[in-house]
Amino acid sequence: MIIKHNYRNISRAAKQFMMGDKIMEQNFIVTLKTLYNLPNTYTSPIHKLYHFKRGIGEILDRHYALFSQNIHPLQLLIYEQSNKRVREANDPVFQQTLEGINNRIKELSNEKMKNMNIAEGESLTIENFEECFFKAMEEYRSRQPFKAKSVDSHGEVNDNLELRRPFN
């Protein structure tokens, strides 16, 4: 009962700061349901622990305190993603880029449809659409001047996992 009550409290506390943005609320609810279902995906029988439910309830009490103060890391992440979505929706350059990619996907799918017998009921499969999408995205990425290089001038992978200190 405590766990279900905390779900309701967390949901209400988070939604009060979302200013009625339905997409952000839906994103939050899906994420919250996923996190609540996470212990059910474990293969070890943690649900048989004696104080498991009480421990989960206490952890959720702490999460609720953070949500009610609008400082929970999950909340902040969802705000950041929502702000990015709104920025992209209002950015004309981004919209033109998406329009260009969509037009290229349509061109590629039309080329594929030329080889099909539409009169006999042939149509593009999901795999064909997927192939057109991947090819259009590959062309888009090849035109972009990405700053990160995965291979350095010596052919070594430059993954920056290890910071080396110069020994002076």
Image (cartoon, grey):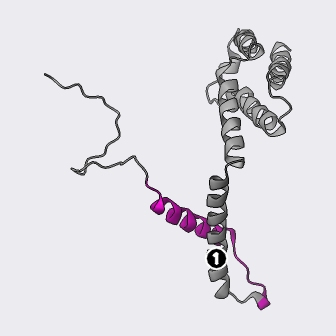
Between 160 and 88, the one lying in front of the other is 88
Q: Is residue 85 above or below residue 70?
A: below
Q: Nearer the viewer, residue 57 or 162?
A: 162
Q: Quadrant of residue 45?
A: top right
For residue 143: magenta? yes
Left/right of residue 7 with respect to residue 49 in the rendered view: right
Q: Does 163 sit above or below residue 13?
A: below
Residue at coordinates 82% horizontally, 24% vertically from top-left?
Answer: 11
User: Is 54 covered by the magenta stretch?
Assistant: no
Residue at (66, 36) in percent of width and height: 81
**Residue placed at 72% from the left, 9% from the top?**
58
Q: Residue furthest left?
A: 168
Q: Position of residue 28 (x, y in %)?
A: 76, 32
Query: Is disc 1 placed on a helix, strand or loop?
Result: helix
Q: Position of residue 168 (x, y in %)?
A: 13, 22
Q: Nearer the viewer, residue 77 or 62?
A: 77
In the image, farthest residue toward the front: 92
Find the magenta span and give its range.
119-145
> What residue is shown at x 34% (from left), y 36% (from top)?
160
Choose between 11 and 96: the one closer to the eye.
96
Residue of label 1: 107
Instruction: Give the tally of numbered discs.
Output: 1
Dominant secondary structure, magenta:
helix
Residue 111 x/y as whole percent = 62, 82
The N terminus, quarter of image: top right
Vertical relation: 2 (above or below) 23: above
